[in-house]
Image (cartoon, rainbow, N blue to C red):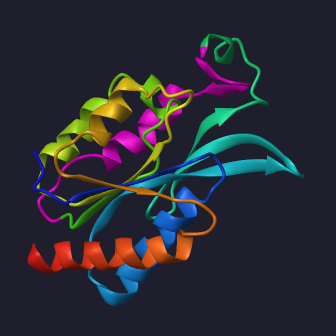
Amino acid sequence: MAAPSKCFLVTGPPGVGKTTLVMKVLEMLRASHPILKAQGFYTSEIRQGMERVGFEVVTLDGRKAPLASTTVSSAESQRWPSVGRFKVDITSFESLALPEMQVKEDTDLFVIDEVGKMELFSPSFFPAVSRVLESDIPILATIPIPKFGRDIPAVAQMRNHPGATIFTVNKGNREALKEQIYTQLVDVLRRA
């Protein structure tokens, strides 16, 4: 398992700014550590006007692939799993996200946004997350807040990981958490 305090998990309700917080921390780390080797991905909304019509997965070097959509209607997509009104394109997600989850010797930091219901439809995703957790590489990840008091089993496993530090973000503490997470990650990277 990862050493204590090397797994930083950001949680909070949908739309509170978890992804934005993680990306701002990464931006600060890259500014202070120009040779930082970070790998992973984040999710981004796809909008048509004011309506959210999907999500895409984006690697830290800018490559993109669809994750979920309300607008795809093919014979194949009818068999895709659903989260609410979104159909999840597991094949597309896996083709981009799984290679980013490969543990490499020279990696300084993993960013995983997010370990959530859509991503967990991939049978290969959580085993890849587990390999990252077992490595000695620091992780900055987002996880959903439990719904109706119930946690997704894989998310509960991460939340209960002995090396995990949980940061619950809300609109009032985003800036303070950004500084706190950044400071703790700098300390971890310094000790590495």
> Is residue 109 positioned above or below 33 on the image?
above
Which of the two residues, 125 or 170, is positioned nearer the viewer here?
170
Residue 125 seen anywhere in this rendered image of the structure: no
User: Residue 82: x percent and y percent?
Assistant: 63, 20
Answer with left or right where residue 29 lies relative to residue 109: right
Answer with left or right where residue 123 lies relative to residue 191: right
Which of the two residues, 153 or 64, is positioned nearer the viewer here?
153
Residue 192, quarter of the rendered image: bottom left
Give the magenta-colored segment's residue range. 80-106
Answer with left or right where residue 100 lies relative to residue 142: left
User: Residue 185: x percent and y percent?
Assistant: 27, 72
Q: Is residue 89 magenta?
A: yes
Q: Is residue 69 magenta?
A: no
Residue depicted at x 26% and y 82%? 35
Residue depicted at x 73% and y 18%? 74
User: Residue 50: x percent and y percent?
Assistant: 88, 51
> Is residue 54 positioned above or below 89 on the image?
below
Q: How many numbered circles does the render carry?
A: 0
User: Residue 159: x percent and y percent?
Assistant: 32, 41
For the N terminus, the image quarter is top left
Residue 20 seen anywhere in this rendered image of the structure: yes
Which of the two residues, 6 or 62, is positioned nearer the viewer here?
6
Residue depicted at x 66% and y 52%? 15
Residue depicted at x 54% and y 57%? 18
